[in-house]
Image (tube, rainbow, N blue to C red):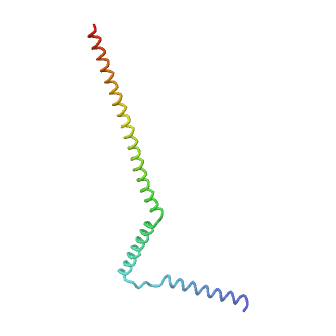
Amino acid sequence: MNALGRVLVIAAVLLLIVFAAAWLLNRHDTRTPEEKLDAVVDSGAATVVSATSELTDNSAVSNAGTALSKAGEATGNAVSKAGNAASSVLSEASEDVKAASDRQKQQDRQQSLSSSSEAIRH
């Protein structure tokens, strides 16, 4: 076979493929409107289920949930530690105030005793 014959055979095969593709894409759909609607609804439902499973299985979403959970726990721990530290500081401050108050009362008693003894002496 010469070169012209090969080109004609290749062109005929390509033309046959083009006609077959056009026939497949333009053939008549024999489904009823209800069947077409059911197919669209089923396809939409399947797409939603697929997208939902991708979202729930998606590592980014689960990682975000895990990160939020860990952040909440860390915040709770930090607040608890801050509360404990504040409670300790307040307790120490309360003890310091009580000790200072006791010292002041003792000094006041000593001053009143010394004032009373001076008044009795005079």
- Decide which of 54, 44 is in the foreground and name it: 54
In this picture, is 40 found above or below 83?
below
Residue placed most toward the observer, 19 or 62: 62
Is 26 displayed left or right of 31 in the figure?
A: right
* Residue 94 % position (x, y): 35, 34
> Quarter of the image holding residue 82?
top left
- Is 39 rendered above or below residue 64? below
Q: Identify the residue at horizontal 33%, vertical 24% (top origin).
A: 104
At horizontal 40% and vertical 73% (from top left) the residue drawn is 44
Q: How many marks?
A: 0
Whole-percent x, y for residue 33 in the image: 36, 80
Q: Quadrant of the C terminus?
A: top left
- Residue nearest the observer in this picture, 22 or 31: 31
Q: Residue furthest top?
A: 122
Q: In the picture, residue 83 is in which quadrant?
A: top left
Question: Among all residues in the image, which is located at the extreme bottom?
Answer: 1
Q: Nearer the viewer, residue 36 or 52?
A: 52
How far from the left and from the top, in percent, is residue 112? 29, 17
Residue at 40% from the left image edge and 71% from the top image edge? 49
Is 83 positioned to the left or the right of 3 in the image?
Answer: left
Q: Position of residue 6 (x, y in %)?
A: 69, 88
Q: Residue furthest right?
A: 2
Left or right: residue 110 versus residue 54 is left
> Compared to 92, does 45 lie above or below?
below
Residue at 46% x, 65% y is 58
| Image quadrant containing the N terminus | bottom right
